[in-house]
Image: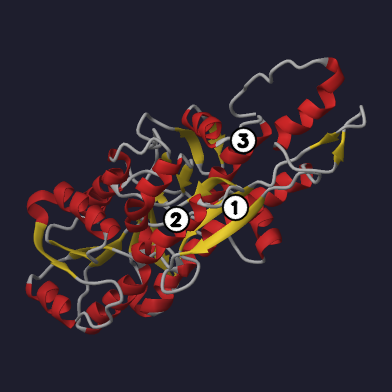
Amino acid sequence: MKHPHTLARLAAATAATALALSACGTTEDTKSEGGETAKCGNYNLAFLGATTGDYGALGQNMVGGIKLALDEYNKDHSDCEVGLKEFDSQGNPEKATPLATQIVGDDSIVGLIGPGFSGESLATGKTFFAAGLPSISPSATNVTITQQGWTTWHRVIGNDSAQGAAAARYITDTAGASKVFVVDDGSDYGKGLASFVTDGLGDAVVGSDTVQTGQTDFSATVTKVTAANADALFYGGYYAEAGLLVKQLRQAGYKGLFMSGDGSEDPAFVKAAGAQAAEGAILTAPAGPAPADFNEKYKAVNGSDSGLYSTQSYDAANIFLDGLKDGKTSHEDLNEFVNSYTGDGVSGPIEFDEHGDITSSVIFAYEVKNGELDVDNPTAID
């Protein structure tokens, strides 16, 4: 469908068995035409990321995309279904590390979708690489991840370099801001993204500060921003802190642009900030809105609307499932399949470079309008 391959020729006497194996590997209790027992593999995909905690909304979006892909696949392969094992790290690298050990110790897991966040990706990448387990992250964007030499690590989303440069262009060219304050949350993701925004802004940066994940009082940062008389602020981090920060900024009288990246691009940002404080905020993401038919299918399976990273995780799951359909069941063979994969996913064109980065992506700007994050009508940033 997306990447053609040719099945090995087998003798006619074992053709039925070969087809069963190429579709799903080896398990048990499927009879071939010759009366011998063919086997179908006990195969699972794994997800590693936050499904609970402050950032669980993003992970739930990802899991929903995977479940949709598996639902579609398993309907067509009811004799050899593929399962999902979820590992909830809450986005914490320290919690992700022992979970990575569990994942590589599970022989039924043939591919990993995730990790969801950059920090946990950097903390666990060596473990997955050593085990040879292929992984595709739908959301981890830190540039340095694909500079580690982990040939099993891939992502179906643009990295922080592309997003940071686009955000800087939006701030100066579209919003017309000339005095920009940059804040990050100290995480691998937030600090990395903010650094690329800072590089793109150049002399327009009038100040910077670092806060912490889990922080709730941003009074010191608010004082710095107002003292700098900034007309725009960019925040590198996640929606929980971003929402509280803009709320406290507005309470202090700040009237400039508030902008953040994909870690904040979720309706949970508006909930954390309050509709009034969030109004007019711009949230960027290297991900466009989900097609209407995708959201309908997603909601039918998950009972809720799709969100940021749902399409990316759906595409990541389908890459692995295409590999299994093609008979690529070992870690090595499946990783080679992923490395050479090309296709058009619902999130956009997919092809990986030699480092595991997607070769092209578009950055979008989403706006909070009338008290809601407008997820259907983003602006592509040139």
* Residue 308: image location, x then y, percent: 48, 57
**Nearest to N terminus: mark 3 or mark 1:** 1
Residue matched to label 2 = 100
* Residue 294: image location, x then y, percent: 63, 50
Q: Quadrant of the C terminus?
A: top left
Callout 3 environment at 10 Å: few (<14), some (14 to 19), or many (20+)? many
- Number of numbered markers: 3
Q: What is the secondary structure assignment of the residue under circle 1?
A: helix
Which amino acid, mark 1? Ile
Callout 2 environment at 10 Å: few (<14), some (14 to 19), or many (20+)? many
Q: Camera-side residue: 71 or 289?
A: 71
Q: What is the secondary structure assignment of the residue under circle 3?
A: loop
Q: What is the secondary structure assignment of the residue under circle 2?
A: helix
Q: Is residue 170 above or below residue 304?
A: above
Q: CA distance from mark 2 to mark 1?
A: 19 Å
| Residue appearing at x 52%, y 57% in the figure | 62
* Residue 229: image location, x then y, percent: 10, 70
Q: Which mark is residue 329?
A: 3
Q: Quadrant of the N terminus?
A: top right
Which amino acid, mark 3? Thr
Direction from residue 26 to residue 218 in the image, left or right: left
> Is residue 341 among the parts visible in the rendering?
yes
Which amino acid, mark 2? Ala
Q: Nearer the viewer, mark 3 or mark 1?
A: 3
Residue matched to label 1 = 66
* Residue 293: image location, x then y, percent: 65, 50
Direction from residue 86 to residue 40 in the image, left or right: right
